[in-house]
Image (tube, helix red, strand yellow):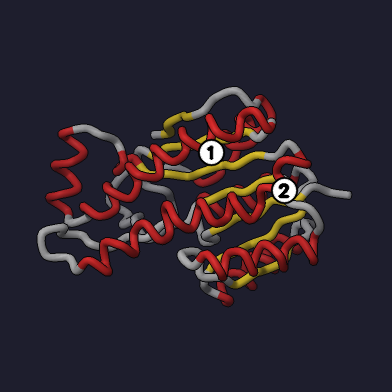
Amino acid sequence: MAKTIIVAGYGPGISAAVAEKFGAEGFQIALAGRSADKLAAGVKALEAKGIKAAAFTAELGDPAAIRGMVEKVRAALGPISVLEWTAYANAAGDLLVAQPEEVRSLFDVSVVGLVAAVQALLPDLKREKGAILVTNGGAGFVDPDVDGMLTQYGIMGLGVSNAAKHKLVGLLAKKLEPDGIYVTEIMIGGTIKGTSFDRGNGPTIEGSKVAAKYWELYTARRELRTTIK
């Protein structure tokens, strides 16, 4: 039976390219996210390329919804071998005025959601000697210049949540290594072409470049982190 990957946080850019790349390599694709329309369009595009895909609508900041999504994927496509987590929240741009609930929402997706997904998938990942691929942003780098940019452009919350996710990846890698589960992270140090951050006023990174790197990382299973600029 073909292996299955869950692409969580599906949309244009990286997640669409990852779905296409892994599908071309023989994987079944489970697209997960909030927008039923985006998911349906993604499934149609993949099927047009001869890739087996299915859509699973879920709020990726809600642990109960994530557990339900994983159960549905497992019932429809069998054991899950890989999780690719692109989901993130961009809120609390100015941390001095943001409401506590807005700040909390950042971690619901970047940290709580990812942990809930890993917990739900753990039996499959152990049995399959699977992998967790985490997409993160350069906003999470601990660097004065990055901090200045995030403050200037009003995306402070994104920096905090990305930094937390960056730490989480390392912890998951250490904890899951004895079980033969590979964890890796790609930090994006730029703008992905075709996404909401692409304003057409600067250089961009093709989603296919990130997807190709993920496949390289997945097959080699050595590197914990890499950065693409």
**Residue 17 seen in the figure:** no
Depth order, front residue of 11/161: 161
94 to the left or right of 56 = left
Q: For residue 167, which quarter of the picture? A: top left
Give the CA distance from mark 2 to mark 1: 31 Å
Depth order, front residue of 181/179: 179
Instruction: Say which mark, if any, is on residue 189.
Output: none
The residue that mark 1 highlights is 209
Amino acid type shown at disc 2: Pro
**Residue 108 location in percent, x, y?**
40, 61
Instruction: Say which mark, if any, is on residue 123.
Output: 2
Which residue is rendered at x = 47% and y = 35% of the image? 171
Helix, strand or loop at mark 2: helix
- 169 up-or-down from 104: above or below: above
Callout 2: few (<14), some (14-19), or many (20+) C-alpha neighbours within 10 Å?
A: few
Callout 1: few (<14), some (14-19), or many (20+) C-alpha neighbours within 10 Å?
A: some
**Residue 83 location in percent, x, y?**
62, 48
Q: Quadrant of the C terminus?
A: top left
- 82 up-or-down from 33: above or below: above
Which residue is rendered at x = 53% and y = 29% of the image? 174
82 to the left or right of 184 = right
The numbered mark, 2 or 1, whose residue comes first in the sequence reads 2
Which residue is rendered at x = 10% and y = 59% of the image? 96
Q: For the residues carrying marks 2 and 1, which lies nearer the camera in this image?
A: 2
CB under 8 Å between callouts 2 and 1?
no
Amino acid type shown at disc 1: Lys
